Amino acid sequence: MTTELPRDAQLLLLDQHQVGALLEPDDVLAAVREAFKLHSADEGQVFPVVRQALATGGVFGIKSGAVPAQALLGFKAAGFWPANRRVGGEPHQATILLMDPATGRPLCVIDGNAVTTQRTGAAGALGLMQLARPDSRRLTVFGTGVQARVQLMYALRLMPSLQQVQYLTSTGRPDPAFEATIAATFPACTLAHASDSHAAVAASDVVITATPGAGALFALDAVQAGTHLTCVGADTRGKRELPPGLLARARLFVDDAQQTSQLGERQWAPDTPATSLGDVLTGKVLVQRTAADITVFDMTGLALQDLTVARLLHQRALATGAGTRLAWPW
């Protein structure tokens, strides 16, 4: 006896506005924490990353994975199209597809830009909470783009002791829009533009690097004992933000050991011992930080983070009726 295939199957679409309305920072933090724990427990599969240069001058990539026990399967196709700026568009583009692992049928297509931004900000914040000194007060952020903003906002939200912030720009000039955004949400924070990267790092307890990763942003001797660094910009082969020799001086933590040895800061010193942040979050590894330790969290982004956040959006959209539904018959 054969079973009739369903003829009323639907495909759910969530655009950027619908995604933004459904995402809440606390929920993203919980989903990203779950992704780290699944990765640590080997319950989540992370498939090889595709990362290729394009003839357009940009980069195209695919991050995919699965959680078999949770019937979770999907991928994110994303990249960088610099020519979009000339027409007033966002150069970073990402699309997430969730699939039914039993049949291969697509379930939900999600605009992945906000997901990427928020899950990366949440990952950086989880690393900060585990690795930075609890009494940290002074922070320096390199960059004022989307990722620099979300990293800083998560940091200020989760670590109220951070009250003094310096930021550096690629132009060397202040960014009034960046200042206004941070001031509107965190009026108690003292925010100042810095022109000397080495002096800013030397005076900081926490350093966040969120730039295109064109080269070392500061000198090795600028990093003082006790500093924590969250490194976001080195996400492709050939990129770097940290000076040579820093990883050898630091306690290195990563989201994925293999990825960071190929795409992250660790690509420049792939033999550097590294601890998975997921192992810290699950308690497999206890971080006994001394006041003098330099800690580095090298982030390249886990497919499982995209998938756990995408699943959250899918479930919330089904519960609220959000999104656009298309007939997608067998």
Image (spheres, helix red, strand yellow):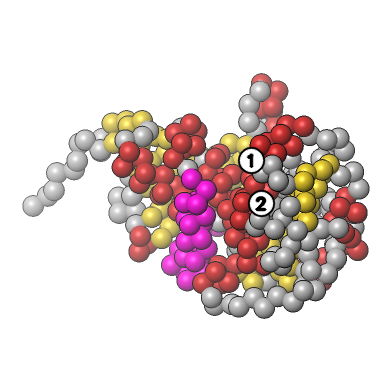
Question: For residue 318, what is the image quadrant?
Answer: top left
Where's residue 291, x and y in %? 77, 74
Residue 235 visible to an observer of this rendering: no
Q: Earlier in the sequence, mark 1 or mark 2?
A: 2
Where's residue 286, x and y in %? 60, 78
- The numbered dot on residue 185 is 1
Q: Amino acid at mark 2?
A: Leu
- Tell whether label 2 touches label 1 (CB within 8 Å): yes
Where's residue 216, x and y in %? 84, 53
Q: CA distance from mark 1 to mark 2?
A: 10 Å
> Looking at this rendering, what residue extends furthest in the left direction?
1
> Looking at this rendering, what residue extends furthest in the top direction?
87
Q: Which residues are magenta?
A: 24-50
Indicate the secondary structure of the residue bearing disc 2: helix
Q: For this rendering, which residue is in front, 326 or 184?
A: 184
Relative to 239, residue 15 above or below: above
Q: Residue at x 43, y 58 (%)?
A: 66
181 in the magenta segment: no
Residue 308 visible to an observer of this rendering: yes
Q: Is residue 29 left or right of residue 266?
A: left
Q: For this rendering, which residue is in front, 68 or 330?
A: 68
Q: Amino acid at mark 1?
A: Thr
Q: Residue at x 20, y 36 (%)?
A: 7
Indicate the secondary structure of the residue bearing disc 1: helix
**Residue density around tag 2, few if under 14, some if 14–19, many if 20 or more, within 10 Å:** many
Where's residue 27, x and y in %? 47, 51
Q: Is residue 141 left or right of residue 108?
A: right
- The numbered dot on residue 156 is 2
